[in-house]
Image (tube, helix red, strand yellow):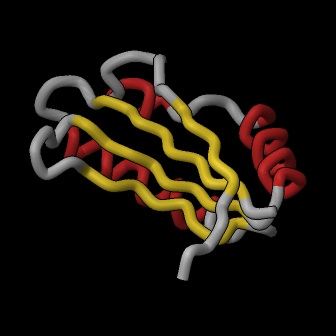
Amino acid sequence: MPVRLVITTYARPGQGTALAQAMAERCRAVQQEPGCQQFEVFQSALDPDKLVVLELWADQAALDIHAQVNASQPPNPLLADLRADATRPREDYTYNRTR
């Protein structure tokens, strides 16, 4: 069953566009991972320093492999410098297509 992740992150004040641009390269890389159906960043039109990452994985196994790969890599210092803090709320959903 597909798994959807919704991750909210905040940029340091005034750095939302820079963070979104910096995350674009990561998005392209992750989109090549097996089982990744979506990995995109969206910037809020109302609060430009608020970003949401939408991920869709074919199944929990694909997400688990992604998590293992992610944990084995050092944090990107540019992303860490642009983020407001290290706390990023994450919501996991099972995906049931409605149309």
The quadrant of the image that shows the C terminus is bottom right
Quarter of the figure with the N terminus:
bottom right
Residue nearer the viewer, 28 or 4: 4
Apparent side of residue 80 relative to residue 4 in the rendered image (left or right): left
Reply above or below: 53 against 30: above
| Residue shown at the point (49%, 27%) measured from the top left | 89
Residue at image x 25%, y 51%? Answer: 43
Residue 92 horizontal/vertical position (percent): 63, 41
Count every numbered label the image shows and give the total. 0
Q: Position of residue 13 (x, y in %)?
A: 15, 25
Residue located 86% across and 49% down the image: 65
- Residue 80, percent from left and from top: 44, 26
Between 73 and 54, the one lying in front of the other is 54
Q: Is residue 41 left or right of residue 68?
A: left
Quadrant hosting residue 36: bottom right
Residue placed at 80% from the left, 34% from the top? 72
Q: Decide: is 60 above or below 97.
A: above
